[in-house]
Image (cartoon, helix red, strand yellow):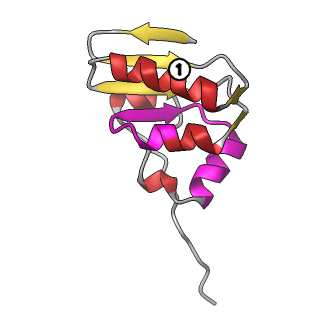
Amino acid sequence: MEIKSTEKYNIITPLSPKLSERESLRIKKEILSEKKAKIALDMSYVKDCTMDFIKQVLTIKNVSLFNIHSDIFAMLLSMNLDKSLKLYVSEIDFIEEKHQLINRQFSLIK
């Protein structure tokens, strides 16, 4: 796990390709030890995660996710968690609080 820290935010990068219960607890412990207002998980190395990870992330109020693998993103959207979590495309978007990913339900009218 790598941690990038500034005065305003912390970015935690899990290096494991799959986030299991054990990894989720380590990440949660690290996040809860931080006193910064903005904390994010850089998911660029993560290809898969368990429900334990999702449950742990949902219990943390001030965490955002970015660089999310398409499979994980699809799972989060199918569970309507885009409304509970702050999801961003990139680190820059997280820092500037722009371009938050939100699932929009569109339909075609004939």
Q: Is residue 57 above or below residue 102?
A: above
**Which residues are drawn in magenta?**
56-78
User: Is residue 66 inside the magenta stretch?
Assistant: yes
User: Is residue 25 inside the magenta stretch?
Assistant: no
Q: Left or right: where does residue 81 sit relative to residue 34?
A: right
* Residue that sits furthest to the bottom in the current view: 110
Residue type marked 1: Arg
Rendered-image quadrant of the C terminus: bottom right
**Relative image position of residue 102 (x, y in whole percent):** 48, 53
- Where, by quadrant of the figure, is residue 86 drawn? top left
Q: Left or right: where does residue 16 sit relative to residue 106?
A: right
Residue, x 48% and y 38% (percent of image)? 57
Residue, x 73% and y 25% (percent of image)? 17
Q: Nearer the viewer, residue 10 or 100?
A: 10
**Relative image position of residue 54 (x, y in whole percent):** 55, 42
Q: Residues within 10 Å of mark 1 (few under 14, many from 20)?
A: few
Q: Nearer the viewer, residue 23 or 77?
A: 23
Is residue 31 in view from this perspective?
A: yes
Is residue 87 in view from this perspective?
A: no
Q: Nearer the viewer, residue 86 or 51?
A: 51
**Relative image position of residue 99 (x, y in whole percent):** 43, 42
Q: Nearer the viewer, residue 96 or 5?
A: 5
- Find disc 1 in the rendering and name its residue: 26
Rendered-image quadrant of the N terminus: top right
- Where, by quadrant of the figure, is residue 6 drawn? top left
**Relative image position of residue 65 (x, y in whole percent):** 49, 34
Residue, x 27% and y 10% (percent of image)? 7
Is disc 1 placed on a helix, strand or loop? helix
Q: Is residue 77 above or below residue 90?
A: below
User: How many numbered marks have been drawn onto this rendered protein structure?
Assistant: 1
